[in-house]
Image (spheres, rainbow, N blue to C red):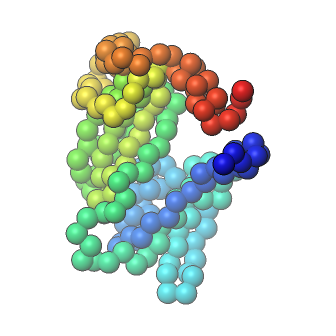
Amino acid sequence: MTRPLAQRHSLVFSHMGFYVRDLARMTRFYKDVMCFFETDRGDLGPVQLIFLSRDPSEHHQIVLATGRPADLSFSIINQISLRVPDLATLREMHRRVAADPDVTELVSATHGNAVSIYFRDPEGNRLEVFVDMPWYCEQPLREPIDLSQSDAQVMAAAEALARSRPRFRSRAEWIADMEQLMGYRA
């Protein structure tokens, strides 16, 4: 069944919310380490909410809500992914995250089409902060990368990994293919 073009392209991801055990601790982490701004807070019945954003056009991108059960043995969130514009910003986020004593499992990786850091926030939710590369390669693919290297060395390592894959092409070509697949262009 083919949907009208406007209907196919009108659904845009805006924000997510998740339950936390320690609202103050998690608010501090997302504000101080991840550089989100608090846009609102309040109670909705028995649930306390903190609204956070890094985008002035979005009231909130993340909502922290009280009520996460203490006996939950793992986070049901696979990961929260945040894009940065360049390797310098990625390194700065790595520095900030590494300095926080409540962060665990910090690793740097390349997927060929992106360079990322992964880590767990104070309540064990996995986050990814990444920068896109100007090429595409099929996923999943994940190899360690040393962010202490120069930009040129990091880019060369990511590109070499991407080029080793059979469907390597420019990001622009991949986007054009996806636009056609999704009906954005004929």
In this rendering, is residue 46 above or below 103? below
Q: Residue furthest bottom?
A: 45
At 70% from the left and 34% from the top, the residue drawn is 184
Quadrant (top left/top right/bottom left/bottom right) for the C terminus: top right
- Residue 85 percent coordinates (x, y): 52, 30
Q: Is residue 54 left or right of residue 32?
A: right
The quadrant holding residue 166 is top left
In this rendering, is residue 180 above or below 157? below
At 37% from the left and 51% from the top, the residue drawn is 79
In this rendering, is residue 184 above or below 153? below
The answer to whether any part of residue 49 appears in the image is yes
- Number of numbered tags placed on the structure image: 0
At 45% from the left and 66% from the top, the residue drawn is 18
- Residue 76 percent coordinates (x, y): 34, 63
Say which of 9 and 48 sits in front.
9
Say which of 13 and 29 sits in front.
13
The quadrant holding residue 29 is bottom left
Q: Is residue 29 left or right of residue 17?
A: left
In this rendering, is residue 128 above or below 45? above
The answer to whether any part of residue 153 appears in the image is no
At 52% from the left and 53% from the top, the residue drawn is 36
- Residue 75 percent coordinates (x, y): 31, 63
- Residue 113 percent coordinates (x, y): 42, 26
Q: Is residue 84 left or right of residue 94?
A: right
The quadrant holding residue 149 is top left
Q: Residue furthest front?
A: 1
